[in-house]
Image: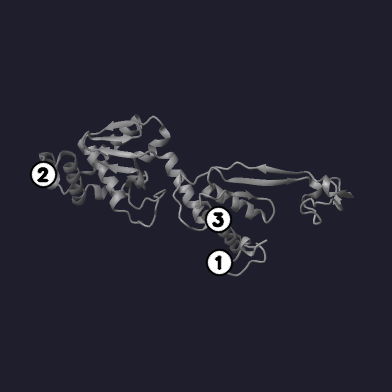
Amino acid sequence: MPGDCLIVIKSHDGVPLQDIRDNKENEAAGDIITGFIREKAKDLTVRLHCSIAGGRKTMGFYLGGALQLFGRPWDRLYHVLVSPEFESNPDFFYPPKKPKLIPCRMPDGTGKKMSTDMADIQLAELPFIRLKEKLHLGSNSFRVLVRLGQEGIDTALVQEPLRVNLRDRALEIGDRTLYFTPMELALYILLMEQKLHHCRRREKKYCLECIDCYTSVGYLMGREALKTLVACYEKIFGKDSLRSKELYEKYRKRGGIPSKIIRQVISKIRRKIEDGIRDKNLVPFYTIASVGSYGTTQYGLSLEKGKMVIE
């Protein structure tokens, strides 16, 4: 067999592994197997026929996982099934051309010599889910690839896109259209923009459980938030509309919008979203979420920022 057909599994430091015995060696093997499959899967002229038989069990797991992440429709995964008497027999690897007798341990624990031509060997094809066209994954370690893949699945399968229709003063969630008053829509847009433009963790590709962009009632009832709401009115009605100027003049002398009004608007938004979305399991993603106790409550949106569009 040519030497270039053999791949030596090495540690992350480049040292060939004698075996896979600890976490570091385990992850190094996974990364090499995954990298090999990823590179081969880039070549459309190559068909992958992969077997998980033999080696350490984690090697087979990594091979199957790598095919799920990068395999194409024409790639195949197999396992070799061998009759019990020969499966773990150190004297048996594969039936030789010329049969021979070898000592075998029987299921009842007794020993017996059997001919190698009695070995029952079957090639079983294993189905696997192909995610290559559903996820956008870079060249990372197997552990990171799994995490990114899971995040992509979680957000793609659960959360439908949210579109703000400024002209109609409405939220479009999937095939549902929910209509809001100008103040309700402006407040919702403010919280959207907190997530879209004031993210404190821009290195994170997915929001998931992060609530760092949530804001307090104290902020929402302040002058800065009032200016932001006025800007939202301008988006809704146009910069020359009197509606935005009226909103600013109404609350300017008070230093912002009173907390009672803010909470009333939030309640109305929540009610419209709860009533308007058919699948109640999706409501938490689109309603205004709150964390903390009364007086220190923070408000925000749980939906992934990549699912939000303002038009």
* Mark 2 and mark 3: Cα distance apart in space: 61 Å
User: Dot 1 lies on which element?
Assistant: loop
- Sequence-wise, the earlier of marks 2 and 1 is 1
* Mark 2 and mark 1: Cα distance apart in space: 64 Å
Residue sitting at x 40%, y 36%: 282
Name the one closer to the observer, 105 or 243. Answer: 105
Q: How busy is the neighbourhood of tag 2: few (under 14 within 10 Å), some, or many (20 plus)?
A: few
Query: How many dots with numbers?
Result: 3
Q: Which residue is mark 2?
A: 249
Q: How busy is the neighbourhood of tag 1: few (under 14 within 10 Å), some, or many (20 plus)?
A: some
* Mark 3 and mark 1: Cα distance apart in space: 14 Å
Q: Which residue is mark 3?
A: 34
Side (left or right) of 80 relative to 147: right
Name the one closer to the observer, 239 or 14. Answer: 14
Quadrant for the C terminus, please: top left
- Coloration mode: one colour
Residue sitting at x 42%, y 44%: 155
User: Dot 3 lies on which element?
Assistant: helix
- Sequence-wise, the earlier of marks 2 and 3 is 3
Residue type at mark 2? Glu
Report the mark closest to the observer, 2 or 3.
3
* Mark linked to residue 12: 1
Side (left or right) of 148 relative to 296: right
Residue 161 location, quadrant: top left
- Sequence-wise, the earlier of marks 3 and 1 is 1
Q: Contact (CB < 8 A) between labels 2 and 1?
A: no
Residue 238 location, quadrant: top left
Residue 90 location, quadrant: bottom right
